[in-house]
Image (cartoon, rainbow, N blue to C red):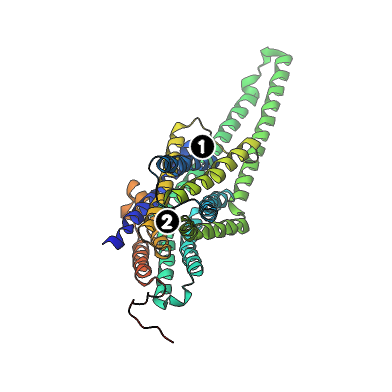
Amino acid sequence: MKSLSFLVFVVLTICCWGIYGPVLHIGQGQMAGGEGKASLRPFMCVGIAYFLIAVVYPMVILKTTGEKGQWSMSGIFWSFTAGAVGAIGALGIVLAFKFQGKPVYVMPLVFGLAPIVNTFVTMFMSGTFKQASRIFYAGILIVAVGAAGVLTFKPTEEVKKDDASSQLETAGSLITLASFRQESEDVAASDPKTVTQDEQGAEESVQSEEAAAKKDSTKGELKEEVAKITEALESEESKPNLFIIALCIGITALSWGAYGPVLHKGQAKMGGGRLRPFLCVGLAYFAIAVIVPWILLGSGVFEEPGGWKHIGGVFWSLAAGAAGAVGALGIIYAFNFGGKPIFIMPLVFGFAPVVNTLTETVSKNLLGEVSPLFLGSLAMVIVGATIVLVFAPRGPKPKPANEPAIN
């Protein structure tokens, strides 16, 4: 059973990364103060949480108790690179949404492509292409298709879409109602029967006509502004930058797919240590997820609604970052207890979106809306991940000690 002890940490990572999305989604909404969703400030909270868990904690443990292994320049390089690609992948998601990308197709593509990238990067680094069987490749394909299906057919995506449409229609109705009310007030104010009488004199009649003309002008300006806003909204919704969105999805898939193998190599270069590579990951996250957004917000290049005054948003965003950091630590320990990235990362990327989907479904009381396509996709992920685990290439078998040499 010792050889399977790494699965405990795999499950920990799956749970943490599975709740990461829903928790961060709450933080983004609350931090924006009801004006859409914030992006850079929640991203900074994620980086701060990584700093506390992946930098401060390892430094204290290394200083007080230490661990096996040692620092090395190559180990620092590979571990820092792993943290950098992880943070860049998260930033890629933020940018995909910024350019009008929709979660309904962005996330399925990312979670479908990342495990495939991870597997082939690992096989390239370990030179095990020849050991991979057709069954193994079929398992990778099943995991990718199943993960995409789970996210595509999950009921929360449809509800979000319907809610957004409902909110847009409600906003349009309110604008129309406000416009009609303004028109009614203008007509009533400009009606000669209500503002002019014979006994009021010519001077009061002129003042009434001037007021009516002014209100007519205001009404025209209001209609013009509403037309501009409507045109801008329609333009943003109908003209997403598909090239940039596709580029961001590709960057995220490549980054998150390469994270596991690169981190495993950094750990090996540091003599199998756990906390030293993890510390480097935290430093990389701090640099990319805290310093870079802080510069962007301070320079005014990127502006967003809300601010730091929304304590609830800060709390939930920090909680999301903590979940992400604990999940990364779980991968470190999984590697340390004998797990290999060639099947650890497909398991994580296969089951984490399932946990994410189930969390949202249960929390929003949508179990009755789960479709057969969702259940079928969920089964594909489980079966495919099992195939990957059983048939993963493990390299050449060691020769028995008493086996005679072949001349």
Horizontal and vertical percent position of residue 115: 46, 63
Judged by depth in the image, the label closer to the viewer, 1 or 2, is: 2
**Location of mark 1 (residue):** 32
Quarter of image, res 405: bottom left
Horizontal and vertical percent position of residue 323: 40, 46
Horizontal and vertical percent position of residue 280: 50, 48
Q: From the viewer's side, name the closer residue of 93 and 150.
A: 93
Q: Is residue 54 above or below residue 221?
A: below
Query: Badge 1: few (under 14), some or many (20 or more) residues near its Cα, within 10 Å?
Result: many
Which residue is depicted at the point 67% across and 30% down? Answer: 218
**Location of mark 2 (residue):** 272
At mark 2, the secondary structure is loop
Left or right, residue 196 beside residue 381: right
Picture disc at residue 164: none
Query: How far apart are the two marked residues, 1 and 2, measured between alpha carbons?
Result: 42 Å
Quarter of image, res 391: bottom left
Residue type beneath disc 2: Gly
Q: Counting residues from the N terminus, which is met first, the one under dot 1 or under dot 2? A: 1
Which residue is depicted at the point 62% across and 39% down? Answer: 295
Split into 4 quadrants, where in the image is the C terminus? bottom left
Residue type beneath disc 1: Ala
Horizontal and vertical percent position of residue 91: 55, 49
